Amino acid sequence: MRNWKLKNGYTIFQVLILRSNCFLISCPNGNILVDTGIQGSRTRLMKNIKSLNLANSKIDFLILTHSHFDHCRNARYLQENENCKIIMSENEAEYARTGYTTLPEGTIQLTKLVSVLGNMIGEKGFGFDVFNPDILVKENLSLIKSGFDIEIIATPGHSIGSLSVIVNNEIAIVGDTMFGVFRNSIFPPFADNTRELIASWKKILNTGCYLFLPGHGTAIKRELVKSELEVFIE
Ligand SMILES: [Zn+2]
C-alpha cells in the first residue's frame, strides 16, 4: 500500500484508490481517517485498514474534506461501527444532516453539462446516509490538544466547506481542492467558486508542505502548485 513517512514518526497510508482516495494518518497516539469513498468501496476500505495490522487500530477521528457523495458515503457506517468522531466544515454540516449535497458546478463545458444533469438526478443518485458531525470547523482547527500534530484549515472553492488536513507542515491532504488526475494541471473539473479555489491553493502552499495528496489521482508536488498559481493569478 502506498505510504508516506513523516519526520515526526507519523505514517500516511493510502487506504483507498481509484474512484476516490482515502488516507489513514497513523500516529503513536491513534489514527485519523480522511474521507471514506463510496459505498461500493466500503469492504475494500475496511480490509485495507485491517491489513495494516496496526498495534493501535482505533480510528479516533474521521475528517471529511467535504460532503460530496464520493467522499462521505461511508461516514455514518464508520461513526457507528468504529466509534470515530466526525470532523467537517460547519458550512456543510446541514448537508450531512439531510444526506445530500448538490453537485458542484463544472469548470469546463463538458463538466458544466455533467453537473446540470447530475443535479437533475439529485438525491436519488448522489445522496448518502445522514449523519451528525461531532466537531465542526470554521476557519481552522488544531488537533494538538487531542495529541496529534495536525491542523485542519478551511480551503473553500471546490465546495463551500472544503477542508485540507495539514500533517506536521510536511504533507497536506487536500480533497478536491487540487486534482491529481492530469499531468500538468491541478485544476479540478468541478468547483463552485474558482476564485476562492485559487486563494485556497495559496493558503495551502503557505503552510510549507512539500506534497499534496488529492481526493482523486496521484500525489502532487509543490512545484506544480506553484506554477499553476502563476498561470491562474495572471
Ligand atoms: Zn468533490
Image: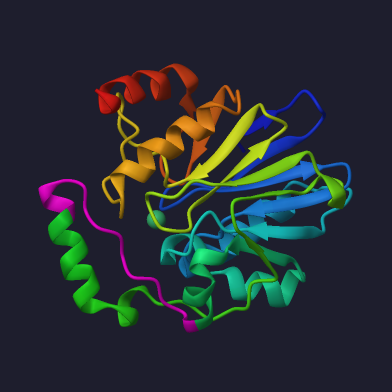
Q: Is residue 11 magenta?
A: no
Tell me which residue sits at (77%, 71%) in the image: 83
Residue 180 in view, yes or no:
no
Instruction: Name the quadrant where ligand 1 sits.
Output: bottom left
Tell me which residue sits at (16%, 69%) in the image: 117
Of residues 95 and 128, the one drawn nearer to the viewer in this rendering? 95
Whether residue 85 is situated above or below residue 109 in the rendered picture? below
- Indicate the position of residue 203 as horizontal and vertical percent values: 51, 34
Name the image quarter holding the N terminus.
Answer: top right
Left or right of residue 199: residue 140? right
Tell me which residue sits at (35%, 25%) in the image: 229
- Indicate the position of residue 9 as horizontal and vertical percent values: 82, 29
Name the image quarter holding the C terminus.
Answer: top left
Left or right of residue 163: residue 6? right
Residue 105 in view, yes or no:
yes
- Indicate the position of residue 63 as horizontal and vertical percent values: 63, 57
Q: Is residue 104 magenta?
A: yes
Q: Quadrant of residue 194?
A: top left
- The segment highlighted magenta reads 98-111
- Indicate the position of residue 114 as horizontal and vertical percent values: 18, 60
Whether residue 19 is situated above or below residue 232 in the rendered picture? below
The dominant secondary structure in magenta is: loop
